[in-house]
Amino acid sequence: MKKLILLSIFVGLLFGCSEDILDGTQKGTIKGSVRLELTNEPLANVKITTTPSTLTVYSDEEGNFEILESVPMGDYSVKAELNGYVTEVEAVSIVNANQTVSIVFEMIVDESLNTPPEKPELISPENLATDLPNNLTLKWSSNDVDSDTLVYRVMLSNNITNEQIEFADIEVDTLALESLHFGTTYTWQVAVSDGVNEEVFSQSSQFTVRSNPEYRYHYVEKVNGNFTIKATNLDETIEITNANYSSWRPHKNNIALKLAFLQTLAGQTHLVTTDLNGENLHQISQAPVSGFRPDVMDFDWLNNGSKFIFPSFDKLYKINYDGTGQQQIYQTADGHFITKCAWSYDGSKIAITTNDINGYQAKIIILDGDGNFIETIFENQPGAVGGLDWNITGDKLLYTYDVSGFENAEYRQLDTRIFIYNFNDQTAVDMSELSMKPNGTIDIDPQFSSDDARIIFMNTSNDMFSVKSIYELYYDEENQLTRELIIYNGEMPDYK
């Protein structure tokens, strides 16, 4: 019995000694890495501690750390701390001697420590600035002490409609505005976001766009594949229509104080009018302006502003300035399309060009003001014919003709020249030849100036792909016929 008791005491002492040794001397390792959650970028100098406490270590340049063979067996909370980041805690257990446990900390930025951006300062235009152009650039500034990426939102409204337009996701501190309404006051404000804090708003600022300068030259420029109408005094250019839709063949009327042009509406070409600043669009034509190539076709406006004429296939229509009273006044006898038309200054005569479906077999026909046939002054010549504009007295007519006689499916012109037809002696003078038109180019879309002293027209290479530019043809002080470039990269000129 004594032997049994002594044996039990011995075993108890033996096991008691073993537990003290495991708690104090049998240790494991905790190692791991620290990364930025969004990018997996390693984070250095992150403080790693445990609870219960063991060694304190820091992550290296690769974001790695190790508490080597210093962690007694047991349960631990491992903490990762770095200024500017949310502290992370992971639970681990060391259950065996010499055990290694791995941890990956994914830390996030502590947004509570992020400072909002500075309130944007509106720099340009100055508050209450007036007489500004209708194309201008807004400029502002803002800073962020945390060097966060700033994104801006610009809010713009006008005093006419009070409509607010918003421009979002701007990553620069400027915004170009085009085709602002003339004579209109605008209010603008900028909001800035750093992606962390709430948006910060600037103060509001106002500026006023000048009144429409009503320039006399109008022309067309192709922008993003669409025809855009512009106006100029040859020193400054303003945009009348924007490039969201095609608008072409501008004709200004100084009595009506309106601008008329062709525009694509619901897939059809129609005659429309606007104010001289491009606002208050009004559709005039009831039947579409249709026939041979919409970009080649043209209409005309009676000088007193009361009526229009426009073609549709083989018919010529007359219509009042407000879109009422449309009536057919002429139809070709051979079914050919009417492509161009021009009203004389007093409205007593109308000139038209007609052609077949390919643009050829062209004629120039003269009608009276009611559409009755008078005479044909050009026919039976191969090649393209165009132009059409009367002088003030109605005894001369501008037109164009490709003297090469070339014809192809693309309606290419090789040597198109400007002619003045004189009704008094029934002769035509080649003005392009007299002014030494450069070889390999064409002159098209001529128009008399309002005093008949000049001819405004477009010239371009006969490859039809080169830049189109607008010129004036006039006699200089030495009575020499002169060609002068006035508008680079423009076509379909109108001067009123």
Image (spheres, grey):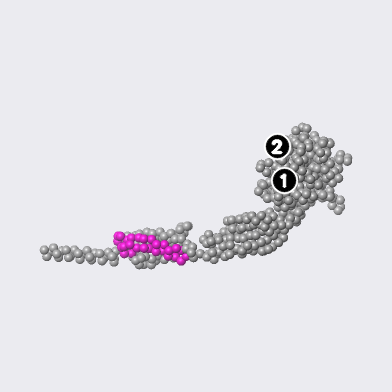
Residue type at mark 2 is Ala
Q: Position of residue 292 (x, y in %)?
A: 72, 38
Mark 2 → mark 1, Cα distance in angstroms: 30 Å
142 horizontally vs 356: left or right: left
What span is colored magenta in the figure? 71-97
Badge 2 or badge 1: first in the primary sequence: 1
Give SS at disc 2: loop
Q: Position of residue 359 (x, y in %)?
A: 74, 37
Give SS at disc 1: strand
Q: Against 490, is 46 above or below?
A: below
Q: Nearer the viewer, residue 323 or 380?
A: 323
Q: Which residue is mark 1?
A: 272
Q: Against 69, is 392 above or below?
A: above
**Mark 2, residues whose alpha carbon is within 10 Å: few (<14), some, or many (≥20)?**
few
Q: Nearer the viewer, residue 157 or 234?
A: 157
Rendered residue at 64%/55% (across/down): 163
The reply to whether residue 133 is visible in this rendering is: no
Q: Nearer the viewer, residue 390 or 80?
A: 390
Residue type at mark 1 is Val
The reply to whether residue 116 is visible in this rendering is: yes
Rendered residue at 58%/59% (across/down): 152
Q: Which residue is mark 2?
A: 409
